[in-house]
Amino acid sequence: MLAPQLKPASWIDSPKTLWLEDACLPQLIIYIDLMTAELLKNPKEWVHLFHQTAGYACDNVTVYAKLLPIKKGFFQKFKSITDKYLDSCISSPPSLSTAQLYDAELKKLGLSADHCYHHLQEGFYPIDIQHIHKLTAKLPQTLDSLLLKPEKSGFYCPAHWNCALLGPNCD
């Protein structure tokens, strides 16, 4: 389910910048870092996203993201995960025991965070990119088709694509 109440903000040189109200969460995103955004084929389909994380540590995640609808079977399960970690003040990188507990919860859903657990923090829940097509139907089968001339960019590599679930942050 796509977040219903998005509030755009103005920001110089950004095609679209937004932040999400807690009522809009959880929200699934696919994202890339800011240095690679110029390689996107349709940049207007992406947003410059700011999301406060890590509880009272007040960290922020800033990425170019595509907001994706969550398949029905996962929305409530994801809400349970984000509710469980609200007020945890996990900051990145998490402790090994916290990362293992989070990964165990994902494994119950047939997902994992084996390659991205180090990004885990309150409000930002990474999921290994190879699971993205289980979670949403709104992406092409090959992610490199989202890029301008992927065969010449030298950019496409699964390690450059990231998937995360945004949740509320206690602060």
Image: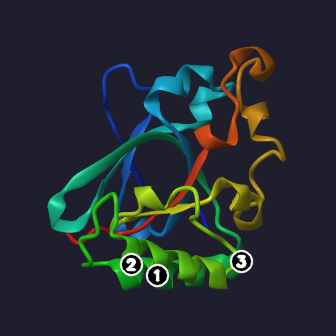
Instruction: Read off the residue under disc 1.
Output: 101
Residue 3: tell me if it is visible. Answer: no
As helix, strand or loop, the secondary structure at mark 3 comes to loop
Kindly identify the amino acid type of the residue bearing the numbered disc 3: Gly
Spatial separation of the CA atoms under disc 3 and disc 2: 20 Å
Circle 1 Cα neighbour tier, 10 Å, few/some/many (<14 / 14–19 / ≥20) = few
Q: Give the amino acid at mark 1.
A: Leu
- The numbered dot on residue 86 is none
Closest to the camera, between mark 2 and mark 1, is: 2
Distance between the alpha carbons at the discs numbered 1 and 3: 15 Å
Work out whether mark 3 precedes mark 2 in sequence or the reverse, and give the earlier one: 2
Q: Is residue 168 left or right of residue 135?
A: left
What is the x, y in percent for residue 105?
A: 55, 82
Q: Tell me if residue 10 can be seen.
A: yes
1 or 3: tag closer to the N-terminus: 1
* Residue corresponding to mark 3: 110
Give the residue at mark 2. Answer: 97
Q: From the viewer's perspective, tell me whether residue 1 is left or right of residue 61.
A: right
Determine the image quadrant of residue 121. Answer: bottom left
Residue 2 appears left or right of 158: left
